[in-house]
Every structure is written in C-alpha cells, then in structure tokens.
C-alpha cells in the first residue's frame, strides 16, 4: 500500500487508516489554490485492500455528503436535488449490502467520517456535480480494487460484483445529470 504524507504532516483520519483519497498531496476534499480555474484535479487514490477499507469510501462519498449538506442551492434546482437523493439512496443500499456481509462474517465495520468538503458549499450545482462525478469515478475504481483483493472469496466477490454494477450505473446517471446541468447553466447564462 502506498502512503504519502505531505511535508506539513497533515493527514485525514482516512489517510491515517491507510485508505484515504488524495488530490496532489492533499487530503481529498481539501481545496488547492485556484482549483476551480483549472477544472477538476485528478485524485491519487489509495486503493482499499479489502471490503472493510472500501466501506468508508462508499459511505462517505461526495454524493452522500452533497445530499446531507444540500441547502446551498436554489429552489429552481429541485430536479437535481431529487435525482441526487435517489442516487445517494442507491449508494446507501450498496453500503448496507457490504455492512450485512461484513457483519455476517464478524468482520470490522467502520463507516468512517466525511472529508472536509465545506469548500464546496455555496457553489452552483453544475460546479458541484463535476466534483461528485470525479469522486464517483474514484468510488468505482475503489470497488474494483476491493473486488480484486477479495478474489479468493466467492461470496465477497458476488457482493462486490453487485456493488460494482450499481456504482457504475450511479456514475453513468451522475454524468448525465452533470451534462444536463451544464446545458441548463449555459442556456440561462
């Protein structure tokens, strides 16, 4: 497992646990100077080594955070809110599948904590969605990594196959929602 700790020693709890996501040496979710001008920075993903490490990545994704902290948008964006809520509920069902599997096997269950995404408060939905899409791409890659790590366990593999299909479908829906949001923003701007 690769662990990179910045010179200032700052680590998120997920990094300390060895499963954090990182943007250019910073914990995922921590803004970089002028990040919004350069577009979405690509994350360096520390891949999970098992289902236990996948769980906080799924349960504390940016999609989940966006639904919990929604009030920064206008009533005109109700469609996006409703769609994100539906997608977050689907992702929560994947979390529940993994928790049930881990519980049945008496393996550790840790949902983790959210990274600090407060810098994404008070932004437009189309701006937020590009980050949600980027994070969901990381979630899909993390599920694939956990699937490879659990290859010797057919039951775990089946659970992760189901989760992967659903997370890829969520990613496809998020991409469509983002494209729609960008088109609407361009028309109104």
Image (tube, rainbow, N blue to C red):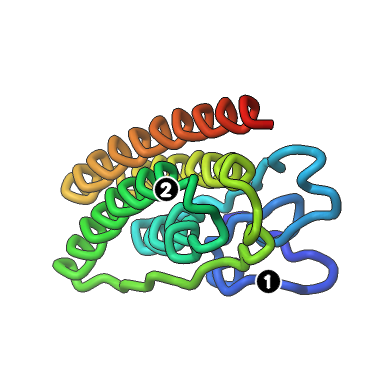
Residue pictured at 29% horizontal, 39% vertical? 166
Left or right? Give the position of 116 relative to 63: right
Residue pictured at 40% horizontal, 56% vertical? 58
Residue topped by disc 2: 78
Quadrant of residue 5 in the image?
bottom right
- Tell me where residue 175 appears, x and y as whole percent: 48, 31
For the residue carrying disc 2, how many other residues have a C-alpha within 10 Å: few (<14), some (14-19), or many (20+)? few
Marks 1, 2: nearer the viewer: 2
Observer-nearest of 1 and 126: 126
Quadrant including the N terminus: bottom right
**Disc 1 to disc 2, how far (Cα)?**
36 Å
Under circle 1, the secondary element is loop
Vertical relation: 51 (above or below) 132: below
Quadrant including the C terminus: top right
Vertical relation: 32 (above or below) 111: above
Residue pictured at 18% horizontal, 64% vertical? 100
For the residue carrying disc 1, how many other residues have a C-alpha within 10 Å: few (<14), some (14-19), or many (20+)? some
Q: Earlier in the sequence, mark 1 or mark 2?
A: 1
Vertical relation: 38 (above or below) 23: above
Image disc number at residue 11: 1
Left or right? Give the position of 100 relative to 151: left
């Amino acid at each position: 497992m690769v662990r990179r700790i910045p010179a200032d020693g700052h680590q998120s709890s997920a990094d300390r646990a060895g499963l954090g996501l990182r943007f250019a040496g910073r914990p995922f979710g921590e803004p970089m100077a002028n990040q919004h001008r350069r577009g979405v920075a690509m994350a360096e993903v520390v891949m999970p080594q098992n289902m236990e490490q996948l769980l906080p990545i799924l349960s504390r994704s940016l999609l989940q955070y966006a639904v919990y902290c929604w009030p920064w948008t206008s009533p005109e964006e109700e469609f996006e809110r409703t769609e994100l809520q539906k997608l977050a509920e689907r992702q929560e069902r994947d979390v529940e599948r993994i928790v049930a599997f881990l519980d049945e096997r008496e393996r550790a269950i840790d949902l983790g904590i959210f990274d600090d995404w407060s810098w994404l408060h008070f932004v437009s939905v189309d701006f937020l969605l590009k980050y949600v899409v980027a994070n969901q791409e990381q979630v899909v890659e993390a599920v694939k990594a956990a699937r490879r790590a659990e290859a010797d366990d057919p039951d775990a593999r089946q659970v992760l196959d189901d989760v992967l299909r659903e997370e890829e479908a969520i990613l496809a829906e998020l991409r469509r929602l983002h494209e729609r949001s960008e088109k609407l923003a361009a028309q109104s701007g």
